[in-house]
Amino acid sequence: MTDNFTRATGPQTHGAGAAAPDAGHPFLEQLVAHGVPEDMHERFAAHGVGTLVEKLGIVFREISVERVVATMPVEGNQQVAGILHGGASVALAETLGSFAAAAHGGRNRRPVGVDINATHHRPGLSGLVTGTCTPIHLGLTLTTHEIVITNEDGKRVCTARITNMLLQK
């Protein structure tokens, strides 16, 4: 296992019976499992999607500069009252905003979050929530995105806004 601060030293496996990924891409299996499009595998080969994405069960449905969409299950991400944890919603929002900033910044820039806020509108009770991230501002050094998280009925559960700084690699 690796984290966001250390480099992977070899192929990683995730779960019993998992096939070993390509030695040049230690996180290939993880990227595929979480829906990262093939044309973005090289960009995320060194660190994968991150351990929190795995723990939360986030699966990407679409990644582009214009829009990032992913789902996350409510089950397993609940707080003590049995509803979706607000922190899980914020983690989903930050993940989407960071991937969107990475898509905009290209291979030579690395996004780091500098501000995030969220408003929780209603509880996530069951099933999947879907986060849709769209740009508000796409600059050379800063990006700002809005993330709308909805339940399976299309009702808004949370609205978040994130600003990322794009650092030169």
Image: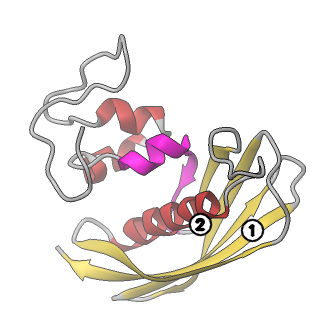
Residue 102 in the image: x percent, y percent?
Answer: 38, 67
> Which quadrant would the N terminus be assigned to in this image?
top left
Q: Quadrant of residue 145?
A: bottom right
User: Is residue 54 highlighted in magenta?
Assistant: yes
Question: For the magenta stretch, what is the residue range?
Answer: 49-65
The answer to whether residue 36 of the structure is visible from this angle is no
Give the residue type that dot 1 points to: Cys
Q: Which residue is mark 2?
A: 90
Q: Residues within 10 Å of mark 2 (few under 14, many from 20)?
A: many
The three-letter amino acid code for the residue at tag 2 is Val
Q: Residue at x 29, y 50 (%)?
A: 44
Residue at image position (34%, 26%) is 14
On screen, residue 101 above or below 92: below
Residue 162 sits above or below residue 94 on the image: below
The reply to whether callout 2 and callout 1 are in contact (CB within 8 Å) is yes
Q: Quadrant of the C terminus?
A: bottom left
* Residue 94 located left or right of residue 4: right
Q: Residue at x 20, y 48 (%)?
A: 46
Relative side of 141 to 101, left or right: left
Dot label at residue 61: none
Q: In the rendered structure, which disc, 2 or 1, sits on the residue that comes first in sequence?
A: 2
Q: Quadrant of residue 30?
A: top left
- Numbered disc 1: secondary structure: strand
In this rendering, the answer to whether 145 lies above or below 94 is below
On screen, residue 56 versus residue 51, left or right, reads right
Q: Is residue 98 magenta?
A: no
Residue 117: tell me if it is visible.
Answer: yes
Q: Label 1, on which residue?
A: 158
Taking the view exactly as shown, the residue that stands out farthest to the top is 17
